[in-house]
Image (spheres, rainbow, N blue to C red):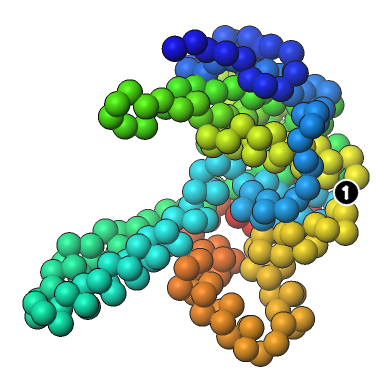
Amino acid sequence: MKDSPLKCDFPETDLEQELEKKLYRTHGGRLASPPARKVVGVSDSSEDMEYGVAYFSERFMDIRSAFLIFRRFQLSVINLFMAVVLVLGWIVSLFYSKALLAVLVAFGPVWVAIYLFEIFFPLTLPIRIDRKEGFVYVGHRGTFYRIPWDELEVAFSYNWQYLGSGVVWERQYYAHLFMREKHYFCGKPPKMPLQRKKISSGFKEEDMYRKWNFIVRYYNEGVVEEDADNLVMANYDSYRKDIPSKSMAARVVDTLLLITFMPTMYWWAFSPFKYKWPKEIEAIFGKINYY
């Protein structure tokens, strides 16, 4: 198996070798900034990008990290799975009376456990891109960095993931943001001079590039006309503003679908169990917390 470089034409980087603690064994590292440049031949559209955006305005945008993206959809997956399982259990119970009870005993505890995790495990903060002042704010384990946009270091890389029997391997792609001690802003003093934060990952290389291109385009141009429509599901407030434009029937259907398959949109807006930006950053932006 040969480790070939990524398709993008960015320069190679050995930034990973400077890390004191390597959490990922990645390959083909390509430095996408500084200065921040788009990947040639890849769209910068915000279409289907609402999963990665927590908040946006002309002043700044909050970008969800990879872990937050997973949490946004995990209840959707488990609720869809349980809906299918319960329907099958009900059908079988027509012939075997205790089938539905057996399904609840088997899968119910896992269902409840995932809900409890979502309710009580605190929500971490996204990455905040400030167009007005030209800074990127990053929280990492209680340490907050303020990185000038012109000094932002983002690298693309990949590693091999084993997907099952028959020696099936696939490349999983990553975009990492690097945080240097000199950019420390507030919170706990950094324990290491260089750390990194995963800002996106997946098995489709182009999707990683498109998210990066969207970020660069937003910083350079701000909110364009299509963004308001494409990012309407980014958070509860943007969705609520869009509700009056729909018919009553559409509102009812949308609400039922969201409560059933994406309750995180409501919960993340009102949950008391979430980290907040420190007072030093709230002094700049106000108390604006989206996840």
Residue 33 position in % (x across, y down): 77, 23
Q: Which residue shows up at 77% across the image and 81% down it?
A: 245
| On-image quarter of the C terminus | bottom right
Q: Nearer the viewer, residue 275 or 161?
A: 161
The three-letter amino acid code for the residue at tag 1 is Gly
Q: Answer left or right for 211 relative to 188.
A: right
Q: Is residue 106 visible?
A: yes
- Visible residue check, residue 58: no
Q: Is residue 46 above or below residue 32?
A: below
Residue 95 sits in quarter? bottom left
Instruction: Indicate whether 4 appears above or below 199.
Output: above
State the residue at coordinates (26%, 59%). Answer: 110
* Position of 47 relative to 149 (above/below): below
State the count of labels.
1
The quadrant in which residue 185 appears is: top right
* Badge 1 density bin: few <14, some 14–19, many ≥20, Cα 10 Å: some
Coordinates of residue 196 in the picture (x, y in percent): 59, 26
Seen in the image, is 252 located left or right of residue 11?
A: left
Q: Residue at x 41, y 25 (%)?
A: 169
- Measured from the top left, where is residue 241 in percent x and y? 74, 75
Residue in front for this viewpoint, 66 or 78: 78
Residue at (23%, 62%) from the top-left corner? 107
Residue position for label 1:
222
The one nearer the camera, 27 or 289, is: 27
Rendered-image quadrant of the N terminus:
top left
- Expressed as whole percent of the image width and height from the top left, the position of residue 256 reads 51, 80
Image-based side of 109 in relation to 245, left or right? left
Secondary structure of the residue carrying tag 1 is loop
